[in-house]
C-alpha cells in the first residue's frame, strides 16, 4: 500500500478529514488535489479541533509533508488565515507545506459571479457554498484564469486582471452589481503574496522521487462522488473532478501507481445544498439523525439534509472508482435507533432501476426499496476493537459489505483520531 486515495462516496462530509488524519500517521506525503475552500474537513486530535479548508488534513502528522497540488483553487485570504491558525496551534509548516504555483486563484469577481448565478437561477439554484468555485474553474478551462505563477510577476498579474475586469465588470454591471476596482484587488493580492511565498514550490519532481522510492502517499479527496461534474447529480454538483482518475490531472500522479482506493461513507446519508436525494428523511427521523450526528455544514453552517444509507449509490461509486475498501464513519450516531433502514436498490415506474441509467430528474422520481435491520441500542462511541461491537452493529456492517460488494476496513466510532476500528 503506497499510494492511497481517500474519496468521499456520498454528497460530502463523510468524515474524510478524520480518516486522513488517522492514516497520515503512516504517510510521508498528504496531497489535497482538487476543489477549494468549499471543502471543510474536520480533524480532532491531540492538538485540538480544526476545520480544514485547504491545507491537507494530514499536516498534524510529524512524519508527513503536506502538498496542495495544481488541481486546487485558492482563496488566498482563507489559505493565509488557515496557515496562521495552524501556526498558533504549534504546527510547524516551514518546509512541510508545499503549494503548486499552477494553482488557480479565486478572485473577488468569482465570488460575486457565484452569487449572481445562484440569484438568477432562483428556485433552480444549485445551493453552492458561495465561495466562487464554479466561476473559478470555468475561467480555468476557458483560459481566463489567473494562477499563482501570475501573482509572482506583478506586471503579468495586473495585465491579466485588467482584461478580466473588462469582462467581469460588464457582466456584474448588467446584473445590477457594482464594478470592481483593479487598484483595490492589486493592493490586497500583492500584500497576500508575501505571506504565501515561503510555501510556493512545484511538487512534481518531489512526488516522482517519492513514487520511485515507494514512499507512502495519501491523496485527500474533497467533496464526494455524487458531486462530481460528470458522474454526480448534475447540475447539483461541484466543479472539480472527484473520481479516482482525477489524481493524474490534478496531482500529477500516474494512475498506475494507485494501490488503494478507500471510499468513505457515513453510516447514513447527508447532503447540503439542492438536488435529488432518494433516501432523504424529511420528518422526525431526519431531525433525530441531524441532532445525533450534529449535521451542520463545516464550511457554511447550513443544516445538512439527512437520510438512510443508500447502497445503490455506494455500489455505483465502488464500480466507478474501483474501491479496494470502505471506511464507515459515524456508526455511533445510530446507537440509539431501534430499527435502521438500508436502501438496497431503486424502483422507477414499478421496475428495478439503477443510478447510472438516468439524470437528476430521474433520480428525484426513483422509489427506494428498503431492508429494515434491528438496531443495537448500545454505545459504540470510542470503540477500537471489532470484537467489542454489538452483534447488530456487526450485522449492519456485514449487510453493507454484502450490498456494496466491498469489504469494510475502517469503522469510525467518534470524531477523535483514535476513535476507530481497523478491521
Ligand atoms: P469531511 O468533509 O468528509 O471531512 O467531513 P466533515 O468534517 O465536514 O463532517 C464530518 C463531521 O463528523 C465532523 O464534525 C467530524 O468531527 C465528525 N465525525 C467524523 N467521524 C465521526 C464519527 O465516527 N462519529 C461521530 N460522532 N462524528 C464523527
Ligand atoms: P467536503 O469536502 C458538502 C456542495 C455544495 C453544493 C454543491 C456546489 O467538506 O465534503 P460549490 O460551492 O462547490 O460550487 O457547491 O456542492 N459541496 C459540498 N457539500 N461537502 C463538501 O465538501 C462540498 N463541496 C461542495 O453544498 O450543493
Ligand atoms: Mg466537510
Image (cartoon, grey):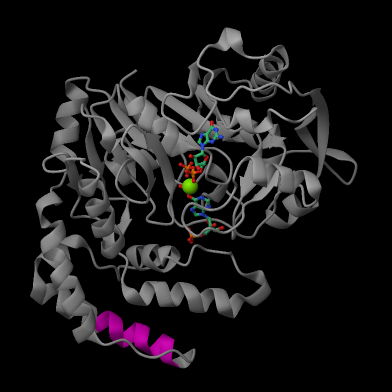
- Using residue 384 as the reference point, say whether residue 345 is left or right of it: right
In the rendered image of this protein, does residue 371 appear above or below residue 127? Answer: above
Q: Quadrant of the N terminus?
A: top left
In the rendered image of this protein, does residue 367 appear above or below residue 172? Answer: above
Residue 338 image point, x, y percent: 80, 27
The outermost residue toward the top is 387
**280 or 206, which is in the foreground?**
280
Residue 231 image point, x, y percent: 56, 47
Locate residue 302: give its quadrant.
bottom right
* Number of numbered discs visible in the structure rendering: 0
**230 or 221, which is in the foreground?**
221
Q: Residue at x 14, y 72 (%)?
A: 190
In the rendered image of this protein, does residue 170 appear above or below residue 230? Answer: below
The part of the chain drawn in magenta is 163-173
In the rendered image of this protein, does residue 211 appear above or below residue 41? Answer: above
Q: Taken as a whole, is the magenta stretch helix, strand or loop?
A: helix
Q: Residue at x 53, y 46 (%)?
A: 12
Residue 234 image point, x, y percent: 59, 56
Residue 423 image point, x, y percent: 51, 13
Locate residue 141: give its quadrant.
bottom left
- Using residue 73 as the reference point, say whether residue 300 is left or right of it: right
Amino acid at each position: 500500500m503506497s499510494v492511497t486515495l481517500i474519496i468521499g462516496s456520498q454528497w460530502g462530509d463523510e468524515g474524510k478529514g478524520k480518516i486522513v488524519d488517522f492514516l497520515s500517521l503512516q504517510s510521508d506525503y498528504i496531497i489535497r488535489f482538487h476543489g477549494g475552500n468549499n471543502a471543510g474537513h474536520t480533524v480532532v486530535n491531540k492538538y485540538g479541533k480544526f476545520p480544514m479548508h485547504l491545507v491537507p488534513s494530514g499536516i498534524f502528522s510529524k512524519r508527513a509533508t503536506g502538498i496542495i497540488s495544481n488541481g486546487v483553487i485558492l482563496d488566498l485570504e482563507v489559505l493565509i488565515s488557515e496557515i496562521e491558525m495552524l501556526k498558533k496551534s504549534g504546527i510547524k509548516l516551514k518546509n512541510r507545506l508545499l503549494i503548486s504555483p499552477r494553482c488557480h486563484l479565486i478572485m473577488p469577481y468569482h465570488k460575486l459571479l457565484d452569487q449572481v448565478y445562484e440569484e438568477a437561477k432562483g428556485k433552480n439554484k444549485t445551493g453552492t457554498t458561495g465561495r466562487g468555485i464554479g466561476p473559478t474553474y470555468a475561467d480555468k478551462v476557458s483560459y481566463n484564469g489567473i494562477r499563482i505563477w501570475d501573482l509572482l510577476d506583478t506586471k503579468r498579474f495586473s495585465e491579466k486582471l485588467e482584461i478580466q475586469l473588462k469582462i467581469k465588470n460588464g457582466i456584474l454591471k448588467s446584473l445590477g452589481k457594482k464594478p470592481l476596482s483593479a487598484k483595490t484587488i492589486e493592493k490586497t493580492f500583492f500584500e497576500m503574496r508575501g505571506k504565501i511565498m515561503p510555501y510556493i514550490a512545484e511538487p512534481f519532481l518531489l512526488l516522482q522521487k517519492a513514487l520511485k522510492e515507494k514512499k507512502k502517499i495519501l491523496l485527500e479527496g474533497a467533496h464526494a462522488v455524487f458531486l462530481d461534474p460528470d458522474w454526480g447529480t448534475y447540475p447539483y454538483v461541484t466543479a472539480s473532478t472527484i473520481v479516482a482518475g482525477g489524481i493524474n490531472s490534478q496531482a500529477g500522479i500516474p494512475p498506475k501507481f494507485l494501490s488503494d482506493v478507500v471510499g468513505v461513507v457515513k453510516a447514513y446519508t447527508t447532503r447540503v445544498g439542492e438536488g435529488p436525494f432518494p433516501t432523504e428523511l424529511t420528518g422526525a427521523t431526519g431531525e433525530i439523525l441531524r441532532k445525533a450526528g450534529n449535521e451542520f455544514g463545516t464550511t457554511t453552517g447550513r443544516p445538512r439534509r439527512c437520510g438512510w444509507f443508500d447502497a445503490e449509490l455506494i455500489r455505483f461509486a465502488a464500480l466507478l472508482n474501483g474501491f479496494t475498501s470502505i471506511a464507515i464513519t459515524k456508526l455511533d450516531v445510530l446507537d440509539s435507533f431501534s430499527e435502521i433502514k438500508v436502501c438496497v436498490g431503486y424502483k422507477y415506474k414499478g421496475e428495478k432501476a439503477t443510478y447510472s441509467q438516468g439524470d437528476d430528474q430521474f433520480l428525484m422520481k426513483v422509489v427506494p426499496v428498503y431492508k429494515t435491520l434491528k438496531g443495537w441500542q448500545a454505545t459504540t462511541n470510542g470503540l477500537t476493537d471489532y470484537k467489542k461491537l454489538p452483534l447488530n452493529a456487526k450485522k449492519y456492517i456485514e449487510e453493507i459489505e454484502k450490498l456494496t460488494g466491498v469489504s469494510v476496513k475502517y469503522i469510525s466510532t467518534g470524531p477523535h483520531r483514535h476513535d476507530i476500528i481497523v478491521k
